[in-house]
Image: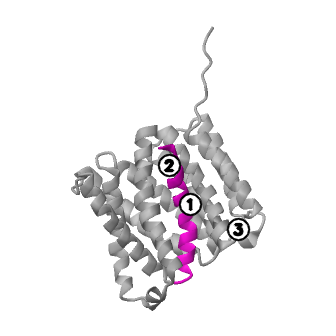
Amino acid sequence: MRGLMFVSMMLWGLTWTASKIMVEQADPFVIACIKCGIVTLSFLPLMLYLKIPFHLPKSSIFPTILVGIFNTIYNYLLLIGLQYGDAGSAGVIAEVLAPFFATFVWMIVKKSTLLRKEKIGLFLGIVSAAFLVDISNPRVLFSLFNAIYVFAALMWACITISSRYATESANPIAINFYSSMIPFIIFLPFLFIQDMQPIFEANRSFWLSMFSVTILSTTFATTIFYKGIKVLGVTQGGIFVLLVPVGALLFAWIFLGEIPKIHTIIGGGVAIGAIYLINFYRPKRRKNK
């Protein structure tokens, strides 16, 4: 299972490189629509095989709709932002800032106080964010690229929290099915507005990338992730998520020739340590003699 979890997280990291390849050949709205449509269809046989009910409990309907709306915004931001910068940097910013936003928003929603380690982790998150957006360079700091992916990280945090409420009484795979169907419905009108000719002229790399971000990265990797969480537990299974930004940088370097910037590496490294501290670190308690 650990091997499958590793492969799944690498596939999630590959999403950024594959998306960059597609954006260079077609309109983001069209790509997002086709992507969400394929993902929705791919979940159908899986749900039928696993006998997962399509009916959602009343308590899960509203949070599922929220997940779908946030997922629509996130999918568009993921694609449109790649027109302004590197796939590896985009993946690191969005992937590592999202957990910090999720922790902060969750704290506000639950009106809870933070543990000491969580306070330290959030402080390190601020430090990592400063490196990731290259605070030393005002031109880069206030760039559209940074703004898009910081906001994308916030949207992913909202997806995380909404999913938590949605999956309290519904199967996670069913939630994924509907959270993909909602963006597909929202993006569908753009197929009749945007120029579809680039899709028909797209080369093999485009469709291989589409297969990667739909069947491999979403349907397969997401299913394995939920299975891994169930088998390994939240702590041991969840820690594999730390591999995603590493995969984003690695595949962008291999397939796109993007050399990771030093501030991205430092910021990503600090962020991974902070995420581990917040979510997975459990200090050992000293036993009384």
Residue 5: which disc? 2
Q: Residue 46: where, in percent of width, then height?
A: 30, 58
Is residue 76 rendered to the left or right of residue 164? right
| Residue 63 visible somewhere in the drawing | no
Label 1 to label 2: alpha-carbon separation: 12 Å
Task: Tell which tag, 3 or 2, sits nearer the viewer.
Answer: 2
Q: Which residues are magenta?
A: 1-25
Residue under numbered circle 1: 13
- Crowd band around label 3 with a 10 angstrom C-alpha radius: few (<14), some (14–19), many (20+): some
| Three-letter code for the amino acid on which mark 3 is drawn | Leu
Q: Please state which of residues 88 and 115 is positioned toward the viewer in this rendering.
A: 88
Residue at 42% in and 89% down: 196
The type of residue carrying mark 1 is: Gly
Q: Which label's residue is closer to the chain start, 1 or 2?
A: 2
In which quadrant will I find the C terminus? top right
Q: Is residue 69 left or right of residue 151?
A: left
Q: Which mark is residue 141?
A: 3
- CA neighbours of label 2 inside 10 A, class few (<14), some (14 to 19), many (20+): many
In space, the residues marked 3 and 2 are separated at their CA atoms by 34 Å
Q: Position of residue 110 (x, y in %)?
A: 44, 43
Residue at figure coordinates x 43%, y 61% from the top left: 218
| Circle 2 SS class | helix
Judged left or right of residue 18, residue 42 is left
- Give, as a three-letter code, the residue at label 2: Met
